[in-house]
Image: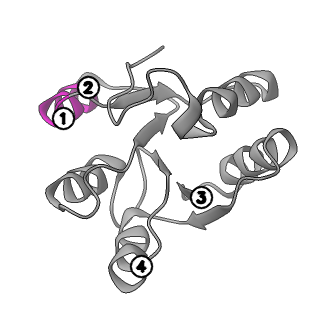
């Protein structure tokens, strides 16, 4: 089960399609911002195998969402990947303060998107997969 948190419908749809086409056993749920994700996690007992967060979202951005997830004993172990189309120096500093984490550029082509889904799913069978994937880009 993978939770995708992104306010951009096109990015979310492309990611969704890549997972469904190349990993049809994957169960996907979408959320438009971090607050919606946290509300869901608080109100329901389903805990995902992976959370993919957009870095820049309205209401609650990816860094704030990740901070809140890591403060929770129930959610801190969920592998989480942050995606962004660009990284500012301030973003890198804010994310670095959280400790090791997964920070990746949003894929710009369908082939890159498929490569990303192959790296992330299924999380439990990816060699070396932990909650602190190395940053790429």
The residue lying at 28 percent from left, 46 percent from top is: 63
Q: Residue at x 12, y 32 (%)?
A: 97
Q: Which residue is mark 4?
A: 45
Earlier along the polypeptide chain: callout 3 or callout 4?
A: 3
How many other residues sit within 10 Å of disc 1, few (<14), some (14-19) or many (≥20)? few
Of callouts 2 and 3, the N-terminal one: 3
Quadrant of the rendering where the N terminus is positioned: bottom right
Q: 117 and 112: which one is in front?
A: 117
Alpha carbon distance from label 3 to label 4: 13 Å
Residue 92 numbered tag = 2
Q: Secondary structure at mark 1?
A: helix
Q: CA distance from mark 2 to mark 3?
A: 28 Å
Q: Tell me residue 94's x, y (percent).
A: 18, 35
106, above or below 34, in the image: above
**Tag 3 residue:** 1
Between tags 2 and 3, which lies in front? Answer: 3
> In this rendering, would 61 be left or right of 26?
left
Q: Is residue 17 above or below residue 46?
A: above
């Amino acid at each position: 089960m993978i939770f995708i948190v992104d306010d951009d419908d096109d990015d979310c749809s492309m990611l969704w399609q890549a997972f469904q086409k190349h990993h049809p056993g994957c169960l996907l749920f979408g959320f438009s911002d971090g607050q919606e994700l946290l509300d869901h996690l608080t109100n329901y007992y389903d805990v995902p195998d992976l959370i993919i967060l957009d870095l820049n979202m309205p209401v609650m951005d990816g860094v704030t969402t990740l901070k809140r997830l890591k403060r929770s004993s129930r959610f801190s172990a969920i592998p989480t990947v942050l995606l962004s189309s660009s990284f500012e120096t301030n973003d890198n500093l804010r994310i670095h303060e959280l400790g090791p984490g997964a920070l990746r550029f949003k894929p710009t082509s369908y082939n890159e998107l498929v490569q990303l889904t192959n790296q992330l799913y299924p999380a439990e069978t990816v060699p070396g997969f932990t909650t602190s994937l190395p940053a790429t880009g």
